[in-house]
Amino acid sequence: MIDNILLYIKLFPSLIKFTKQRIIDTWKWFAFLFIVELVLVLIALITLSFIEIEDISKARWLYRIVAMITFATMFATIFKSFKEYSQDYLITKSFQSTPLITTVANALIGSSICCILSIITLLFKPVNFDASFIAFIVFYIMMILFIIFISVTLGLLDTIYKNMSMIFWLAVVINFFIVPIIFIPSANENLMIQLLKLNPLFYLIDGLATSTIYGVVNMYNISYHIYFILIIVTIGAINFMLMRYVAHSKYKYSSNIIATKNK
């Protein structure tokens, strides 16, 4: 364990260089994502500014815009991150290293795009609605952690299963209908809303959108914060077991190939 930590410290400059090159090679991907989302957000915001609607209705539409930004950016970033993680896994493992640094960099860039677009949306917020900077930062950090942990999980699975991309996009479609984009949870929570909030994506999207438009409301849901942290810890434990399983599977596969060639 200590030897691995010392090795990672020794290889850290090389990992940073590798990550920097990876970001340089794929910067157009993030630029395209940002430009497309920015254009769509500006069109939606300009349209809202010309429509005569009450502040409450306007706030609900702004909530949907932030929720959609968060949803699209998060899933796009996770897809990019886990595909690159699976591609870089064998390369970095051959040097007893890890592709995690690239995943962290992708999470930071993707979350920054979400943050910038949310701030732009915030400028069109009705005057009598208050945003919460502290709440936004808390959920922003939670989003970064979720992207990193789930990208590692999917990246590891992608190295041993061929259909992970199809499963991922199926999950995207399903989650689109069960996170607060089409509908917005009311103040009076019923059983269905409470069950939907067990989905960590619902927690993140609702938290970021609420903190941007309605303020500090979701910061008081301590039980959901604890639940989300437990989810992250659980994913971390799964990742630890998956790393060992994937390493063993790849070693077994390589051994079989060598044995076949020797025959």
Image (cartoon, rainbow, N blue to C red):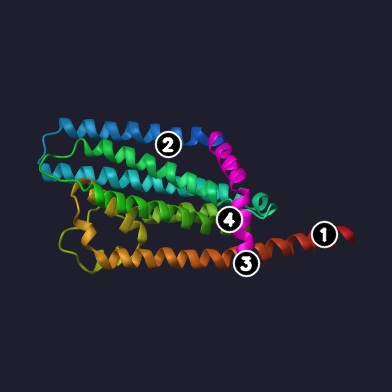
Residue annotated with mark 3: 245
Residue annotated with mark 1: 258
Answer whether labels 1 and 2 touch (C-beta < 8 Å): no
Q: Which residue shows up at 17% across the image and 32% down it?
A: 49
Element under label 4?
Answer: helix
| Separation (CA) of disc 4 from disc 1 | 23 Å
Which of the marked residues, 4 or 3, is nearer the chain's N terminus? Answer: 4
- In the rendered image, residue 251, in percent from the top left (x then y), is placed at 72, 62
Q: Quadrant of residue 32?
A: top left
Query: On residue 33, which mark appears?
Result: 2
Residue annotated with mark 4: 158
- In the rendered image, residue 245, in percent from the top left (x then y), is placed at 62, 66
Q: Amino acid at mark 2?
A: Leu
Which of the marked residues, 3 or 2, is nearer the chain's N terminus? Answer: 2
- Residue 28 lies, with reference to residue 59, above or below; the image says above
Answer whether labels 4 and 3 touch (C-beta < 8 Å): no
Residue 98 is at least partly visible in this image: no
- Whether the magenta-drawn stretch holds residue 227 is answered as no
